Image (cartoon, grey):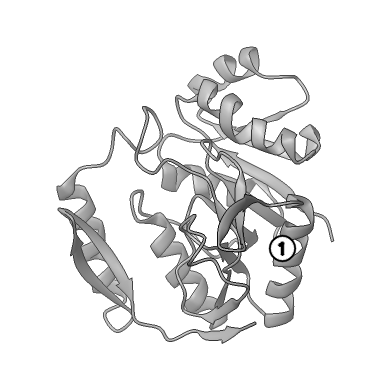
Amino acid sequence: MDYKIVVCSHDRVHTLKKKTLATLEMYQIPKNKIHIFVAEDEEDTYRQALSDEYLICPGEKGLAQQRNAVTRYFASDEHLFCMDDDISGFFCSENKKIVPLDNLDSFIRLGFQKAQEAGASLWGLYPVKNALWLKNTIQKGLVFCYGCSFGLINKKDVQITLALKEDVERTLKFYERDGKVLRLNWVAPGQSYRKGKGGLSSLRTLDREEAECNTIVTQWPTLAKKVVKKERFDIRLAGRPTLES
């Protein structure tokens, strides 16, 4: 079972090189396995800054549009491990201390194996790099799959419409499609949430965040609830996923 690495990027080629691509190089992921999606007017900038071994793919402006461009680009059922452009390593817990993940390739392959065994097309990682919260468990059902790093068995019938809450939308749509998503709770990505220019920074406002939350709870009133967290809007999912060790 093979897979491809997918990175969507916008106006952050130097962040991409310093963080996500450096992380993948540290884990010895072959460059020709890495597909970088950027909007047409940014392609030249990225090509000039990056090695020819990386695959620069045609993307679109806007994160939802980028995600859908990825879906169209790859064949149905291809295995895609998707990453943001600002990932600084992957981590797990050992003796209640955060330590780097030993082997990213083996972890990705295991994620797809577990997803296929469960009949799920979407699987995620634990969203917080916290040594006390990372556990050697797998949750199955309606469980949030954080958008900065996730595994996906490509399905052409799932399209994304939101930007700020696209990971919640994806989680709900794949849950609706398959009856379950998976999350592997012993690995978390390293990421500085909401920091730096580019990416979604230029789009994030309280009004837009609330509007997208309203869209979600309108479409899935029994599965999602809008909550306020530290002067921002978020979604709490209503599912009770099963827990496997």
Work out which residue is located at the far top of the displayed protein and give it.
Answer: 48
Position of residue 113 in the picture relative to residue 243 (left or right): right
Determine whether the residue tagged by mark 1 lies in a helix, strand or loop: loop
The image shows a total of numbered marks equal to 1
| Front one among 144 and 37 | 144
Which quadrant: the C terminus?
A: bottom right
Q: Label 1: which residue?
A: 77
The picture places residue 177, in percent across and down from the top left corner, at: 53, 77
Is 200 drawn above or below residue 173 in the view shown? above
Position of residue 95 in the picture relative to residue 64 (left or right): right
Q: Is residue 78 visible?
A: no
Q: Is residue 203 visible?
A: yes
Is 133 drawn above or below residue 89 in the view shown? below
Is 206 drawn above or below residue 55 in the view shown? below
Work out which residue is located at the far front of the displayed protein and give it.
Answer: 95
How would you rate the neighbour count of disc 1 (Cα within 10 Å): few for under 14, some for 14-19, many for 20 or more? few
Work out which residue is located at the far right of the displayed protein and give it.
Answer: 1
| Front one among 52 and 25 | 25
The picture places residue 209, in percent across and down from the top left corner, at: 23, 52
The picture places residue 182, in percent across and down from the top left corner, at: 58, 73
Which quadrant: the N terminus?
A: bottom right
x 56%, y 85%: residue: 243
Position of residue 122 in the picture relative to residue 170 (left or right): right
x 20%, y 49%: residue: 208
| Front one among 13 and 25 | 25
x 68%, y 73%: residue: 115
The picture places residue 69, in percent across and down from the top left corner, at: 55, 44
x 55%, y 78%: residue: 139
Question: In terms of image quadrants, where is residue 49?
Answer: top right
Disc 1 residue type (three-letter): Asp
